[in-house]
Amino acid sequence: MAIPRVCILLLLPFITSGCGSGPTMYDVQGTVTYDGQPLPTGEISLVPEEKGIAPDGANIENGKFSMKAKAGKKLVVIRASRVMTNPPLGSEVNNPPREDYLPTRYNSKTTLKAEIGTNSKNDLTFELNSK
Protein backbone atom coordinates (compact mmCIF):
# COMPACT_ATOMS: atom_id res chain seq x y z
CA MET A 1 0.00 0.00 0.00
CA ALA A 2 1.53 3.30 -1.12
CA ILE A 3 1.50 6.42 1.03
CA PRO A 4 -0.50 9.19 -0.66
CA ARG A 5 1.58 12.14 -1.91
CA VAL A 6 -0.44 14.53 0.23
CA CYS A 7 0.74 12.73 3.39
CA ILE A 8 4.38 12.92 2.27
CA LEU A 9 4.08 16.64 1.51
CA LEU A 10 2.50 17.30 4.89
CA LEU A 11 5.22 15.33 6.72
CA LEU A 12 8.17 16.78 4.77
CA PRO A 13 8.69 19.87 6.99
CA PHE A 14 8.83 17.66 10.10
CA ILE A 15 11.21 15.16 8.50
CA THR A 16 13.68 17.80 7.34
CA SER A 17 13.52 20.17 10.30
CA GLY A 18 16.82 20.41 12.14
CA CYS A 19 18.81 18.77 9.37
CA GLY A 20 22.14 20.51 8.88
CA SER A 21 21.48 23.27 11.39
CA GLY A 22 24.45 22.35 13.65
CA PRO A 23 25.39 24.04 16.93
CA THR A 24 24.95 27.76 17.51
CA MET A 25 28.09 29.72 16.68
CA TYR A 26 29.16 32.93 18.45
CA ASP A 27 31.39 35.78 17.28
CA VAL A 28 34.80 35.66 18.95
CA GLN A 29 37.58 38.18 18.46
CA GLY A 30 40.76 39.06 20.23
CA THR A 31 44.41 39.96 20.36
CA VAL A 32 47.63 38.01 20.82
CA THR A 33 50.92 39.60 21.83
CA TYR A 34 54.32 37.96 22.19
CA ASP A 35 56.88 39.67 24.41
CA GLY A 36 54.75 42.81 24.34
CA GLN A 37 54.43 43.01 20.54
CA PRO A 38 51.49 41.93 18.35
CA LEU A 39 52.06 38.39 17.06
CA PRO A 40 52.79 38.99 13.34
CA THR A 41 51.14 35.81 12.04
CA GLY A 42 49.94 32.56 13.52
CA GLU A 43 46.97 30.32 14.17
CA ILE A 44 44.63 30.02 17.14
CA SER A 45 42.41 27.03 17.92
CA LEU A 46 39.72 26.79 20.58
CA VAL A 47 39.60 23.12 21.55
CA PRO A 48 36.52 22.08 23.55
CA GLU A 49 37.25 20.46 26.90
CA GLU A 50 34.23 18.25 26.18
CA LYS A 51 35.29 15.31 23.99
CA GLY A 52 33.70 14.68 20.61
CA ILE A 53 33.26 18.32 19.58
CA ALA A 54 35.39 19.77 16.79
CA PRO A 55 37.67 22.73 17.56
CA ASP A 56 37.18 26.18 16.05
CA GLY A 57 40.07 28.22 14.70
CA ALA A 58 41.32 31.28 12.90
CA ASN A 59 44.44 32.91 11.54
CA ILE A 60 46.19 35.62 13.55
CA GLU A 61 47.33 38.67 11.57
CA ASN A 62 49.12 41.60 13.20
CA GLY A 63 48.07 40.33 16.62
CA LYS A 64 44.34 40.14 15.83
CA PHE A 65 41.92 37.31 15.12
CA SER A 66 38.21 36.89 14.51
CA MET A 67 36.12 33.72 14.20
CA LYS A 68 32.87 31.95 14.93
CA ALA A 69 33.00 29.41 17.78
CA LYS A 70 30.74 27.12 19.74
CA ALA A 71 29.94 27.96 23.38
CA GLY A 72 31.74 26.23 26.22
CA LYS A 73 35.04 25.84 28.05
CA LYS A 74 38.05 25.68 25.73
CA LEU A 75 41.73 24.92 25.75
CA VAL A 76 43.49 27.54 23.63
CA VAL A 77 46.24 26.47 21.23
CA ILE A 78 48.37 29.18 19.59
CA ARG A 79 51.01 28.40 16.97
CA ALA A 80 53.41 30.61 15.04
CA SER A 81 56.34 29.82 12.80
CA ARG A 82 59.11 31.76 11.10
CA VAL A 83 61.85 31.10 8.56
CA MET A 84 64.79 29.40 10.26
CA THR A 85 67.76 31.73 10.77
CA ASN A 86 70.27 28.88 10.35
CA PRO A 87 68.64 26.33 8.04
CA PRO A 88 70.30 22.93 7.63
CA LEU A 89 72.71 22.51 4.72
CA GLY A 90 70.94 21.51 1.52
CA SER A 91 67.73 23.40 2.33
CA GLU A 92 65.78 24.81 -0.59
CA VAL A 93 66.49 28.48 -1.19
CA ASN A 94 63.05 29.14 -2.74
CA ASN A 95 61.23 27.32 0.06
CA PRO A 96 63.27 27.81 3.25
CA PRO A 97 62.40 25.64 6.25
CA ARG A 98 60.29 27.14 9.02
CA GLU A 99 60.39 26.61 12.77
CA ASP A 100 57.75 26.91 15.47
CA TYR A 101 59.00 29.46 17.96
CA LEU A 102 56.31 29.79 20.62
CA PRO A 103 56.89 27.82 23.84
CA THR A 104 54.98 24.53 24.07
CA ARG A 105 52.95 25.90 27.02
CA TYR A 106 50.96 27.79 24.35
CA ASN A 107 50.38 24.86 21.97
CA SER A 108 51.22 21.16 22.41
CA LYS A 109 51.21 21.52 26.23
CA THR A 110 48.87 24.48 26.43
CA THR A 111 47.98 26.06 29.73
CA LEU A 112 45.72 28.68 28.11
CA LYS A 113 41.96 28.52 28.67
CA ALA A 114 38.91 30.48 27.59
CA GLU A 115 35.17 30.22 27.92
CA ILE A 116 32.89 31.19 25.08
CA GLY A 117 29.52 32.27 26.40
CA THR A 118 26.12 33.09 25.09
CA ASN A 119 25.87 36.28 27.16
CA SER A 120 29.36 37.74 26.80
CA LYS A 121 31.31 39.79 24.26
CA ASN A 122 33.74 36.87 23.72
CA ASP A 123 36.64 39.30 23.39
CA LEU A 124 39.84 37.38 24.24
CA THR A 125 43.33 38.68 25.01
CA PHE A 126 46.44 36.50 25.22
CA GLU A 127 49.75 38.00 26.37
CA LEU A 128 52.43 35.40 25.57
CA ASN A 129 56.08 35.64 26.53
CA SER A 130 59.26 33.79 25.71
CA LYS A 131 60.40 33.52 29.34
Image: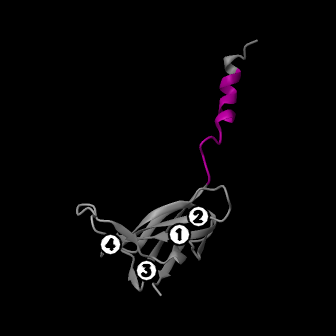
Q: CA distance from mark 1 to mark 4?
A: 22 Å
Whether residue 126 is situated above or below residue 26 in the rendered picture: below
Q: Earlier in the sequence, mark 1 or mark 4?
A: 1
Q: CA distance from mark 1 to mark 2?
A: 7 Å
| Magenta region, residue range | 7-23
Between label 1 and label 3, give the one nearer the viewer.
1
- Residue found farthest to the front: 89
Helix, strand or loop at label 2? It is strand
| Disc on res. 33 | 3
Q: Earlier in the sequence, mark 3 or mark 2?
A: 3
For disc 2, the marked residue is: 47
Q: Earlier in the sequence, mark 4 or mark 2?
A: 2
- At label 4, counting other C-alpha atoms closer than 10 Å, the crowd grade (few under 14, some 14-19, many 20 or more) is few
- Is there a contact, CB below 8 Å, between mark 1 and mark 2? yes
Q: Residue at x 38, y 83 (%)?
A: 37
- Is there a contact, CB below 8 Å, between mark 4 and mark 3? no
**Depth check: 112 or 63 in front?**
112
Whether residue 96 is situated above or below residue 33 in the rendered picture: above
Whether residue 4 is situated above or below residue 38 in the rendered picture: above
- Amino acid type, mark 3: Thr
- Considering the image in quadrants, where does the N terminus appear? top right
- Residue found farthest to the left: 93
- Amino acid type, mark 1: Val
- At label 1, counting other C-alpha atoms closer than 10 Å, the crowd grade (few under 14, some 14-19, many 20 or more) is many
- Amino acid type, mark 2: Val
Q: CA distance from mark 3 to mark 2?
A: 20 Å
For disc 1, the marked residue is: 77
Q: CA distance from mark 4 to mark 2?
A: 28 Å
Left/right placement of residue 118 relative to residue 2 reads left
Helix, strand or loop at label 1? It is strand
| Disc on res. 84 | 4
Helix, strand or loop at label 4? It is loop
